[in-house]
Image: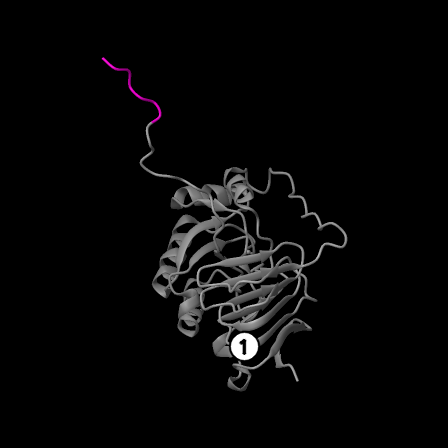
Amino acid sequence: MAAARMDYEPAGELKIGQVGIANLRVRTLDVARLADEMRDRVARAPKLFERAAVVVDFGGLPQTPDRDTARALIDALREAGVLPVALAYGTSDNDALARQLGLPLLAKFRASYEPVGGTRSPDVGAATAASPSPAEELAAMAAPTEDTRQPRQAPQPPPKGEPGLMQAAPVRSGQQVYADNRDLTVLAAVGAGAEVIADGSIHIYGALRGRALAGAQGNEKARIFCREFHAELVAVAGHYKVLEEIPMELRGKPVQVWLDDGQLRVAAMD
């Protein structure tokens, strides 16, 4: 009888990739109010937030909520149009809550898409803040909770004199370009559904129809420049605006985006 072959093909191929997940940092545990705010976000920008994956972060509360309250919030957020997929890291109580809810724990990352209220992302300078590599994300999922693990090292700056990242080809729908610790220059268009991210500033010499997030690790001096503005979303250091919030007279025009005393400004470049 022939020996069983051990080099069989697996039924499923598992790869760890980089994904964009919004981080909802709960600051007031009012289930109805949180659901109403999320429902409004989805209604204003359905292409961005409808059925969006969301990590629920209870780190802004004085204590971790009980299982029934957390479950009610998760159910309410689902009814509002988003999909809670995990809890953010916190205390050992937060770890226990995640187990009770049957949800994983995830480190906060790339959360600058969605703020808790207004134009500031929920630590969304801190969930879009740094964008870890796939290996770092996998390690974070297996790491202990914050009250026992060692602090994460700050990213190392690029070698002195290294130029910014230059993207010559168009960035198409579903693609992402990330400039780690530097500026990003795109010589072509950024299509709808595409995403460009930089820890520094972003310069786009074509049309911007997707998302652009500058100052991803909290650099409030970063700016976004584009020749033709149709952006789905723009953000600087976690402060963001969606297209519906941009004056009609700026659409299709050369614009720049920057922070002014904590407020995101969008203006034509004369």
**Residue 195 place in picture, x, y as percent:** 51, 62
| In the image, farthest residue toward the top | 1
Q: Is residue 200 left or right of residue 6?
A: right
Residue corresponding to mark 1: 229
Q: Is there any visible trace of residue 128 in the rendered image?
A: no
Question: Could you say which quadrant of the image residue 4 lies in?
Answer: top left
- The residue under the point 67% across, 58% down is 182
Measured from the top left, where is residue 85 in percent x and y? 41, 51
Crowding around mark 1 (Cα neighbors within 10 Å: few <14, some 14 to 19, many 20+) is many
x then y, percent, for residue 23: 50, 57
The magenta region covers 1-7
Q: Nearer the viewer, residue 127 or 100?
A: 127
Q: Position of residue 257 (x, y in %)?
A: 62, 74
Look at the image and name its color scheme. one colour
6 part of magenta stretch: yes
Front residue of this view, candidates 129 and 4 = 4
Whether residue 53 is situated above or below residue 146 in the rendered picture: below
Q: Secondary structure at mark 1?
A: strand
Which quarter of the figure is the N terminus placed in? Answer: top left
